[in-house]
Image (tube, helix red, strand yellow):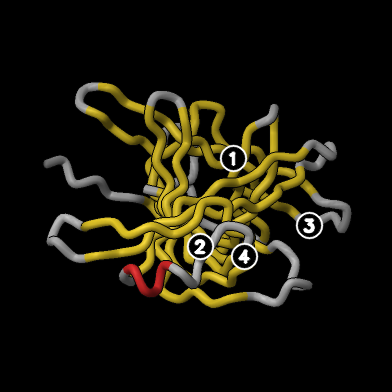
Amino acid sequence: MIKCNLNVCAVISRAASVKEGKENNSFLSFGVKIPVEGRDGSKKDLELSVSLDGDKSKALSFPAGRRVNLSGVLTVRKKDGKMYFNFRATSAESANSNDGDRIEGTMEFRGKVGKKGVDVKTDKNNATYKAFSAFSTDKDGDKAEFTWIRFLYFNPKDGEDFLAANSYIEAKGELQVGVFKDEVTLDCRVSEVKPWVLNKQ
């Protein structure tokens, strides 16, 4: 599971249209794009598929090209090797034309630490931190897809021996978005981590 509580400022790339939900309730669907830059200067657009409560009359407020401020919950899933970013907006309003692109918030993660385990490192201030990668699994029938997240854990606590290769964890922290090898990446600056006890059923 990868879930992020976010505030976003972006330009609408796909105008709002009305969709019907599973319970015959109407909602708006539109797309936004946020330019993301990697540490090496590479750039990529992060595309969010946004859903928002509303009907046809409200759809006119969200044409392509308009800049908007959004708050809500982002869920990330992978299918056929492609990552999908679905954003359920709880609020949406027009932004000023001079407001910059922005995506900020927190991540909640459940998954498994990779087999390379956890590296203990020292930053420029000689403070110890931990770095590791973990993956969340999505299943489509018998087919499994893995979404990897890179974690940086500053000020780690003593006695967290559970944080090791192949361990299952729950983690929370600040979302950081980047680009690597022409793909959008999601990283997390950890504020809390604990063992994840799986429901074997």
Say which label, 2 or 3, has the lower sequence index. 3
Say which label, 3 or 1, has the lower sequence index. 3
Residues tagged 3 and 1 counted as in contact (Cβ below 8 A): no
Q: Which quadrant of the structure image shows residue 28? A: bottom left
| Three-letter code, disc 1 | Phe
Residue 66 circle label:
4
- The residue tagged with tag 3: helix, strand or loop? loop
Q: Position of residue 180 (x, y in %)?
A: 69, 33
Q: CA distance from mark 3 to mark 1?
A: 17 Å
Q: CA distance from mark 2 to mark 3?
A: 18 Å
Q: Position of residue 33 (x, y in %)?
A: 61, 51
Say which label, 2 or 4, has the lower sequence index. 4
Q: Residues within 10 Å of mark 1 (few under 14, many from 20)?
A: many
- The residue tagged with tag 4: helix, strand or loop? loop
**Lateral position of residue 24 relative to residue 178, left or right:** left
- Residue that badge 3 annotates: 127
Q: Nearer the viewer, residue 149 or 115?
A: 149
Residue 110 circle label:
none
Residues tagged 2 and 4 counted as in contact (Cβ below 8 A): no
Q: CA distance from mark 2 to mark 1?
A: 14 Å
Q: Nearer the viewer, residue 45 or 168?
A: 45
Q: Residues within 10 Å of mark 3 (few under 14, many from 20)?
A: few
Residue 132 circle label:
1
Q: Which quadrant of the structure image shows residue 11? A: bottom right
Camera-nearest label, 2 or 4: 4
